[in-house]
Image (cartoon, rainbow, N blue to C red):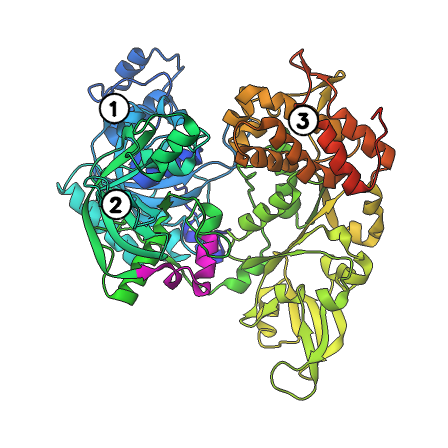
Amino acid sequence: MADEATSADVQTRLDLDDGGGVHPDIGNAWHFGFIDDKWWDLFRQQGSISPGWPDIEFDVSETEGYDELKEQSELDTAQKSPNDAVEQVRRFAHDLQVGDIIFAKDGKRGKGDDGWTGNGKILAIGIVTSEYKNQPADEWYDNIRESHANTSNKHHRSVDWIIDLENSERGPFRPFVKLQQWTLHEVDYEALKSQILDHYDADKAFSDLESISSDYRAGGPVGPVSQQSVWIEKSYHNRSDREVDGWGLGDALWCPQTTGSGASSVHYELVTDVAEGDLILHLDQNTREITGVSVAADRYEETTCLEGTRWDDQGVEDMEFERGERPAYKVPLAQYEEFDEPLDVNTFLRESNRDLLDELRDEHTVVYDTNLDLNQGAYLTEVPEKFARLINDTLSDEIGQPIPNLNLSHSTYVPQTRESTQSYEKMENGIGSLQFEIPGELYFEDSDEIRRQIEATINSGKNIIFTGPPGTGKTELATALGETAREFDQVHDTTFTTATADWTAFDTIGGHMPDTNGGDGIAFQPRIFLRCFRNESGITNEWLIIDEINRADIDKAFGQLFSVLSGDSVELPYEYQGEDVEIRWVEDTAGLAAIENTESIFPVTPSWRLIATMNTYDKASLYEMSYAFMRRFNFIHIAVPALEEDGTVVTRHLNPDAGENFAEAWEFERLLADDDLYKQVSTLWFKINQHRKIGPSIVKDMLEYVAAYDNGRRQEALTNALVSLLLPQMEGMRPETQKELIVSFGDSEETTDEESVTPDVDVEALKRRAEDFFHIEFDDDG
């Protein structure tokens, strides 16, 4: 939770880009900046950095001079400057040395006019371990995305990432001064290290970092750092093919290339991502046990299914293949080793690991579901590093042996948060300079304006209510804002809740209840609001995020907070341990220290915020809030994008070839391109918005549904998506309007592509479902 520097940090408020990177033993220190998270995944996983400049894709290893390189590149640059592409690539190839230290900087703060806005966060720190190399990205990297394979990122260095700040409890570190936005630039190592050590317990990590750097500078080993992926193969170990030489357990991974209907399957295609040296954990689906481990001996080969197996039978019966002709993938395995005892999945998929497992499931595709049960149908699943460590630790605890041949990033440190001695001082200082990033899965045509509104509101000390129709991304913005706030030291956490019509002050503030500490009487028990200011550990500062705040009776549920939101204190009609309960506005460190042990006082500081969302399903709901409540918030409206222009349906929002839009943000380009699905969905979105505004999140839900539906049944999939996801949005409409809208789903519309588009949906099926759903009747004419 990086934050503004306190008074104690004044001496380290240096310009980190003023050079000063030379250290007696380790040489230079640099920041390497990027704005593409998918490139960072490659850099981190495969131990590299690879910048790209479209006009300088050639090998520059023999061209050391700036003028000579500029002439070869034919770039028209007025003069040499630090952000000149010629100077950047020259610096990367010639000034950067083996053993130098690299600070990986995520510069993406949302797209501004120049493509870069805000400061940036330090995600990891590593050592340059190889000389400069020039080659196409798909030759340098294993398993690179197609979108990244043919880019100008042809300049490479290997890096051993030693310190992982991104995955630490505190998260990435935002320096107290701006780093340069350029790709590669020297930094003051000692100043940046000092700032990081103020917030992370990383002394040992930096000591090892410097030792490794020094070894490389002294002529240590040079070369790419091998990165091993771990996979789980989930299958029935008593399958007949397991007895066939070359196809058995530990001999090979193999599976068909498609499902029985001919559709692609990510669980099969993942076999093509397995690289030589990767580790395979063999999970018996029948016994729910991991029985052993193998190592991939090579990449996959294309072959055919083994005759007489279930997959071969399916190819004959359902796909019209001859015996042994159904296409398959096969990866040869070696070094198969059974565990001394099988490891039951319940030993690590258990409630005591719930927090970690839920975190991994939110961030990765994993082998288990929300109930910590095994997913159905997942033949092959990549194992995140934290999950691999959990399995390895469990195997060591349960059976007394680690996973053989496991080669995780042994030298990577994930530092713990250093206890701050200036917590109260940070809380009194407010937020000051929050910089917000629109989440990558969200897209707004006016994203820069939304970002600026959010930053201005928070940095000026105000609270926020996001308003707009359902599905416009309000909740996601509020949640992301909370995650950003947690990067600040003075924001200890966030609390998320959804308002209800039953809420009273008892639910939000608290009240007298039977004593939970063993007493015979009643005692004051704080509820959700007050727990944001004081918990079992003492004074705290947790931002409160309330979804759909206008569901509640505002004055009844929040009335006692009105004054506090304006910077005043409130005495409540309760006592705790003989003292009056008070919500106190506190602006100074001394005031916080004075009430540290007074549990009846709940302090609100300038760094606390209330973030809420409100569906404007009915605009009158806005006026259910009293003026006294409304004036304590800034309202930021999140609108549905324009779906009509000059009487025609706008298709650019979902057009997979239109560049930055929802299709790109959701990574649905292929699905939407199939049979011009984007035109049909754009038309359906337009039609329902003629009667009730709905945002893009509901459209995304529809597309996820269609993508998961049995391939080849597009009309059925689209029709059922409307039934499941759009019909509920029509609740409360007048019956005539409902019928009119249902019938219109089968009508054509002119689009901005100058085409007439008729959605491929079964209107008669929609009518039948609507009659059941809304208790309406359609006459013979519609």
- Count of numbered badges drawn on the protein: 3
- On whether residue 333 falls in the magenta region, the answer is no
Inter-mark Cα distance, 1 to 2? 44 Å
Judged left or right of residue 337, residue 145 is: right
Q: Are marks 2 and 3 in contact (CB under 8 Å)?
A: no
Residue nearest the viewer, comparing 307 with 432 = 307
Q: Residues within 10 Å of mark 3 (few under 14, many from 20)?
A: many
Choose mark 2 or mark 3, whichever is in front: 2
Which quadrant is home to the C terminus?
Answer: top right
Label 2 sits on a secondary structure element that is helix
Res 617 seen here: no
Mark drawn on residue 242: 2
Q: Is residue 352 magenta?
A: yes
Contact, mark 1 vs mark 3 (Cβ under 8 Å): no
Task: Identify the element where label 3 is drawn.
Answer: loop
> What kind of residue is marked 1?
Asn
Give the residue at mark 3. Answer: 761
1 or 2: mark nearer the eye: 2
* Residue receiving disc 1: 134
| Mark 1 nearby-residue class (10 Å; few <14, some 14–19, many ≥20) | some
Local SS, label 1? strand
Amino acid residing under circle 2: Arg
At horizontal 46% and vertical 55% (from top left) the residue drawn is: 373
Three-letter amino acid code at disc 3?
Val
Q: Residue 691: x percent and y percent?
A: 80, 31
